Image: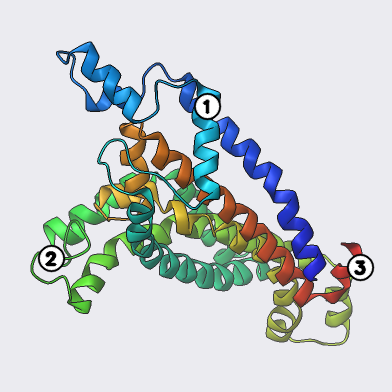
Amino acid sequence: MLWYIGKRILQAVPMLFIICVLCFTLIQLAPFDAIDTITRPDMAPEVVAALKVRYGLDQSAPVQFITWVKRMFTGDLGYSIVNHQSVAYGLLSRLPNTVLLVLPSYTLALILSMVLGLLAGAGHGGKFDRVVDTLCSIGMATPTFWVAMMILYVFAYALNLFPILGMHTLGHESSFQDLLRHMVLPCTVLTAAFLPENIRYVRSSTITQYQEDYVTVQRAFGARRGQLLFGHVMKNVLFPVITRVGMALPMLVTGAFVTESIFSWPGVGTYFLTAIQGFDYPVIMVVLLFSSVAVILGNLLADICYCLLDPRIKSFK
């Protein structure tokens, strides 16, 4: 197992390098850079040139990239060009806020998806299955920002039950109750956003499992519906779900851009969007790098879980 993990990590290194090269190239191809966002048209050309020298933007693109890679190897994530803040501090101070929002939302969505998807798949073609399938179609077709705006209007503005924006009420930064009140609406939006695809995935896997021979055999031996569903089918449905859980790991880094922006949640998502608006390439590159690492780690964790749940898979590695 250790040999396999080491091999996967080594295979990920060139992939990460290619991702970094592609991202950096795309940033360089843009018709403007971060200096354009922090200067004014009436500034003297000497001042603009001095700023470019200060941030190394007067160098050629390959030199800038090599300098950035060297910094990464030394653990120096650099500084934001727009707000001059350390990228490491900016990222680490916002990462817990994103995890606090995304983790409970995805966990709740996953539990609900397992329950609803299994029941819908087990009763394929029935009333409950049709209702769940229709709701999933509506949920997938509805934009997240529209759901967020509607929930904000009803529960925060019209009914005044929850705060509208931010993570804390001014003067109540240490209050856990205040934090929970601020979390309710964005977590609800995120859970609603995660649900439809996950339900469809579990439902589809359940329907596939019910067509397998082992289900026919269990039925022939008189297995009850609940015993068949939760004792046999659910275990096999868990395998593909593990892949989705692994792929959800990058969301803990990149966050949920739309939801964080609408609710002014101080997470990585809003940090990344602000960096894109300012073409703040040191921040953009680091967030993309961390997101890529999270994707690779997510896949690796999913494979490890596969091996732990079914030791037969080891023989195919």
Amino acid type assigned to the residue bearing label 3 in the image: Ser
Q: Give the Cα separation between the discs numbered 3 and 1.
A: 45 Å
Quarter of the picture holding the C terminus:
bottom right
Q: Which residue is the site of mark 2? A: 169
Q: Are discs 1 and 2 less than 8 Å apart at CB?
A: no
**Residue identifier under label 1:** 63
Q: Nearer the viewer, residue 174 or 17?
A: 17
Q: Residue at x 21, y 23 (%)?
A: 39
Q: Is residue 125 visible?
A: no
Callout 1 environment at 10 Å: few (<14), some (14 to 19), or many (20+)?
Answer: few
Residue 18, position in %: x, y? 65, 36
Relative to 129, does residue 24 appear above or below in the rendering? above
Question: Looking at numbered disc 1 in the image, what kind of residue is underneath it?
Answer: Val
CA gap between label 1 and label 2 equals 46 Å
Amino acid at the residue labelled 2:
Thr
Residue at coordinates 49% horizontally, 29% vertically from top-left?
A: 64
Q: 298 or 15, which is in the foreground? A: 15
From the image, which quarter does the N terminus lie in? Answer: bottom right
317 horizontally vs 265: left or right:
right
Residue that carries the numbered disc 3 in the rendered image: 315
Residue 233 location, quadrant: bottom right
Q: Earlier in the sequence, mark 1 or mark 2?
A: 1
